[in-house]
Amino acid sequence: MEKRRKIVAFAVALMILVSVMASFQRMHMQSQALPIRVACVGDSITENSGYPSDLQSLLGSNYSVGNFGVSGSTVTLNSWKPYMNQSKFQDAEDFEPNIVVIMLGTNDDLRSLHQYNESFEDDYNKLISSFQQVESNPRVMIATSPPIFSNSSDLSPTYLADTIIPKTQDVASNLNLPVIDVYSAFGNQTDCFVDGVHPNGQGASVIASEVYDAISAQYPTP
């Protein structure tokens, strides 16, 4: 009888030990998985607005947000500054992101690039495909460009709304990727822009909030 009690006690102790070890292993794996790396890809609106910093504050310490914006860059590969030809593109892939947020298209709205609009979707697909092949197997999210309120530049508010935004949405839809509707988030808030094109601090907060909501809805914080 005494021997049987010892065997039972030993078995219980062993089960507890295995359970504790499994818990430590889970905690270790979670600690290795954190922080979740978010790569913010885009043009000057990403590079200079400060929205990635605001996003970092919203997401908290479980996330690491990287700013990989390149001023003047485009989706189209026929421009003078395709995003895929910039060193920040390679930096973004080397970041081994878990989530990639791409917000490009504003510079593709330049009138001199309208002639290449037929290749816009194919070029966007190439950009997305390259990120999807990164070893970290990131989840790609597509953000539409903010609206344009200024006619003083070579940008066309109408072309952005009628061509660039729909094409961006089509790319995301065809690949079954989440769309972050930054364009609609601004409405007619012209006071959120420095020059009618580039968001100010308030505009950066709007973008960060939209991206945060999208990430939180798609990929809840562990």
Image (cartoon, helix red, strand yellow):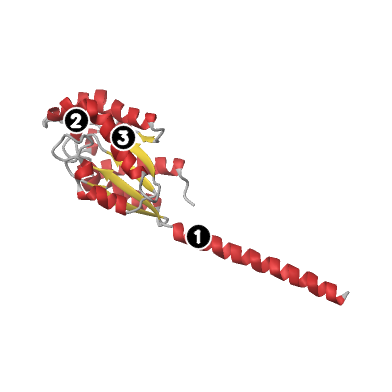
Q: Is residue 145 visible?
A: no
- In the depicted view, which residue is nearer to us: 76 or 209? 76
Q: Are marks 2 and 3 in contact (CB under 8 Å)?
A: no
Residue 163, numbered label: none
Residue 125, numbered label: 3
Q: Marks 2 and 3: which is nearer the front?
A: 3
Q: Give the side of residue 182 with respect to residue 178, left or right.
A: left
Q: CA distance from mark 1 to mark 2?
A: 45 Å
- First reached walking from the N terminus: tag 1 or tag 2: 1
Give the class, few, some or many, for how many residues have Cα within 10 Å of label 1's Cα (few <14, many ≥20). Answer: few
- First reached walking from the N terminus: tag 3 or tag 1: 1
Look at 34% across and 33% down and name the residue there.
Answer: 181
Q: Marks 1 and 2: which is nearer the front?
A: 1
Residue under pointer 1: 29
Q: Amino acid at mark 2?
A: Asp
Q: CA distance from mark 2 to mark 3?
A: 18 Å
- In the depicted view, which residue is nearer to us: 219 or 157? 219
Where is 18 relative to 142, above or below?
Answer: below
Q: CA distance from mark 3 to mark 1?
A: 33 Å
Q: Amino acid at mark 3?
A: Asn
Residue under pointer 2: 109
User: In x, y percent, where is residue 44?
Assistant: 20, 43
Q: Quadrant of residue 61?
A: bottom left
Give the class, few, some or many, for how many residues have Cα within 10 Å of label 3's Cα (few <14, many ≥20). Answer: some
Q: Amino acid at mark 1?
A: Met
Where is 86 relative to 122, above or below?
Answer: below
Q: Marks 3 and 1: which is nearer the front?
A: 3
